[in-house]
Amino acid sequence: VNYRAKEEAHLNRRTLLSVLVALIGAFALLAAGCGGDDEGGAEGTTGGAGGEAKTVKIVSDLPLQGSSADQTAQMNDAIQLYLEEIGNKVGDYTIEFEAFDDSTAAKGAWDEATCAANARKYVEDESIIGVIGTFNSGCAKIEVPIANEASLAYVSPANTATGLTHEGPGAEEGEPDKYYPTGTRNYARVVTSDDVQGEIDANYMKDELGITSVFILDDKDAYGKGVADAFELAANEIGLEVAGHEGWDANAQNYRALMTTIKESGADGIFIGGISCFNGGQLIKDKVAVVGDNEEVPTIVSDGFVQVSLFEEAGEENAEGLYGSAPTLNPEDLPGAGKEFNAKVQEQFGPPEVYTAYAVAALQMILAALEESDGTREGVTNALAGASADTVVGPITFDENGDPVDKFESIFQAKAGSWEFVEQVAAQ
Amino acid sequence: VATAEGAERRLPGRQIPVSQLVLWFFGAVLLAAVAASLGYGLITNTSRFIEVTFIGITNGSIFALVALGYTLVYGIIELINFAHGDNFMIGSFETHSIVTQGRFELPLYPTTFIFWIPLGTTAVASSSAGQRAWTIAMALFWSMLLCMTINVVIERIGYKPLRNQPRLAPLITAIGFSFLLQNIGLIWKSASPQPVPDILPKGNVFSTHGVAYSWEAFIVIAITIPLLVVLSWLVRSTKAGKAMRATAQDQDASAMMGINVDRTISFTFALGGALAGAAGTIYALSIGNTKFDVGFRLGLFAFTAAVLGGIGNLTGAVVGGLLLGLIAAYNDGEFLFSLGARWTTTVIFSLLILILVFKPSGILGEQTPEGQ
């Protein structure tokens, strides 16, 4: 018996196994990354020139790298444009603005560690009285509790996760209280949350699309599962049969076997909750190939899929006819001031992105709270609940949770490579 | 070594501990449950079960092709070539270039300078059958050639100087090359998914009783099986294969017998690279989408498949790959205890752990060429 050889073989196997385990760990970490190109975003400062007036600072916290880079860069540009228009002044205050980035190049999306570091930076800088952000709900869940200890106000232009502001379908255990350790709310948002999105989508599916049995898919991530759970709950309430609810693996090479399950379930409609960069293109492709096209088996996707990039990733012909919901107004339906502002954005920075006007609206809400306050962080935070302003996206009033009082979703449909507005549905 | 080990295990006086027996018992029960669950699916829903089986075999074939590359290299120098998965990704990117740009591309300094040779192979779904066949053949050829070259170069630069160093050293360079290739891919074609037009033949090979078998799935197998046959013929029946087996057994003795060890090892890496290139082409064409990080993900699954089948064992890699593909498909199709897609990765790796606990050397045993 060759003992040395045996021992060595044994050792190899152990090395092999430990490497395997380590790699699976690394794989799990990496899997969270999301696609996009690495264009850096704009960072800039608009200085205030006021003499006797008190100078305060407002910052934005957005992912400036990765797939949302174009959109977030324009959001910052629009914020600066608006501030220039009002002469960087509100009441007695001179406003300074600085843009921060919560993403990393390697990840191409928001990053937990960067979010936390940013929040600490804001807390330390006493001149900062408000933050426009965050873009992603997951990042807000990290930043808001840190800022809460310092009573620093956040107004998000795009967060939709239910649990950030209130209990309800899609919220996790202990939400939203765990984000506000001091007990005082320091967070509000200008868009409608996912529980309402789930409800509106379920109703639309049953009443407008005439679906009797639906299969629900989610991307297993906090946002996607939240909106899918909300949809399921609403479907059960209104008597829309749920044929099944599954999660898809963003790292699978294809979803054909999963789609045979959906076909087998006899569902005549599909709801997809999640973000499209979790291999959403492949999902739509396999759905059309196995279950049938979007006219045969109508499909509603949540706002994380309502992006132009989906047409390239899934193929225009596979996306054709998809319905999507998003908590944003049809650009045509913006109020006069909003249309005017969008025209300026179009002229200076190119076609307005979906959330551009909402970034300005978030800024306007912070300014409204600032005017009501004594100019301190606490003052602004306290003025947030119940704050009200006539913004570029119309009048917004925050309820006691920090949600807009008027809740709605817009339904879009994919047609020949673009998302066409279908109708706006108000929450019941 | 294999026989000596077996004999030693059966030495009189060495008893199997009770804990081992209990473990074996539970293992047997679990396997029986899995078999029962699949059997139930087969009987109650035959046509869909067969459809899902086809999907599993198709996906598994791609795992198997990549797994073979791992196992080949491990068999000869006992190195886990982690760059292999990313080499596969480069192959799928090359296929993307050949199909969509109609040219062979070599990203020398990715953003500013890409060396390219025009081939006129641009094809879309509506191109003529002849043009599509030519494009597929060209994509297969150039991807295999590129990946082969990359693998050989990596071995020369990164592994050869470390051949007599502790095993961890080349393992680390392998991981380094993996990230290097991944970043080349990232700069070459950006981080967004790269769609590849569907140029494989459409329609079904046969369709009866609700079971359809598409040409697309058939072609994956039709390319995989000949490659496997050629590979095993190369290793078993040629002079080069004999040299490979000798080198695996004892490099010094092989050198004394007049075998050019360096060239033999390079040849092995070339074979592995060619397989990665072929897998890349098949992946890009049949899935219709590729991305800079597919190599890491699929490479890990393929490596798992190689370990599952018994690393170093060519047949084992194929068995492991097919098994992995089938398990994933059966679970997605809710034939495994109706767990569903949410649990697929968990199920795959639970089974991997179980198999390794009961049979640490993998299903077919760790059979480096020396044991053949």
Image (cartoon, coloured by chain):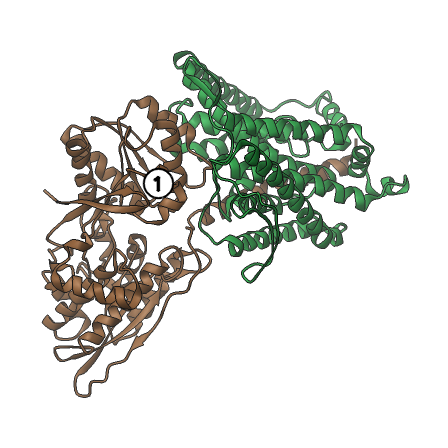
Chain colours: A brown, B green
With B199 as the anchor, is B249 left or right in this view?
right
> Residue at 51% across / 49% down in the picture?
B292
Give the class, few, some or many, for how many residues have Cα within 10 Å of label 1's Cα (few <14, many ≥20): some
Quadrant of image for the C terminus of chain A: top left
Q: On the image, numbered disc 1 is attached to which residue?
A: A220
Residue type of the residue flagged with mark 1? Lys
Viewer-proximal residue, A412 or A62?
A: A412
> Residue at 41% across / 41% down in the picture?
A250
Visible residue check, residue B359: no
With A306 as the anchor, is A367 left or right in this view?
left
Q: Could you tell me residue B29's position as x and y percent?
A: 49, 19
Quadrant of image for the N terminus of chain A: top right
Visible residue check, residue B174: yes
The image shows residue A412, relative to residue A366, as above or below, that is: above
Quarter of image, res B45: top left
With B192 as the anchor, is B22 left or right in this view?
right
> Residue at 35% across / 61% down in the picture?
A116
Viewer-proximal residue, A81 or B38?
A: A81
Quarter of image, res B226: top right
With A414 as the anchor, is B191 left or right in this view?
right
Q: Could you tell me residue B96's position as x and y percent?
A: 53, 45
Q: Could you tell me residue B213's position as x and y percent?
A: 48, 21
Q: How many marks?
A: 1
Q: Could you tell me residue A168's position as x and y percent?
A: 18, 43
**Parent chain of label 1:** A
- Secondary structure, mark 1, is loop
The image shows residue A126, relative to residue A65, as above or below, that is: below
The image shows residue A184, relative to residue A413, as above or below, that is: below
Quarter of image, res A261: top left
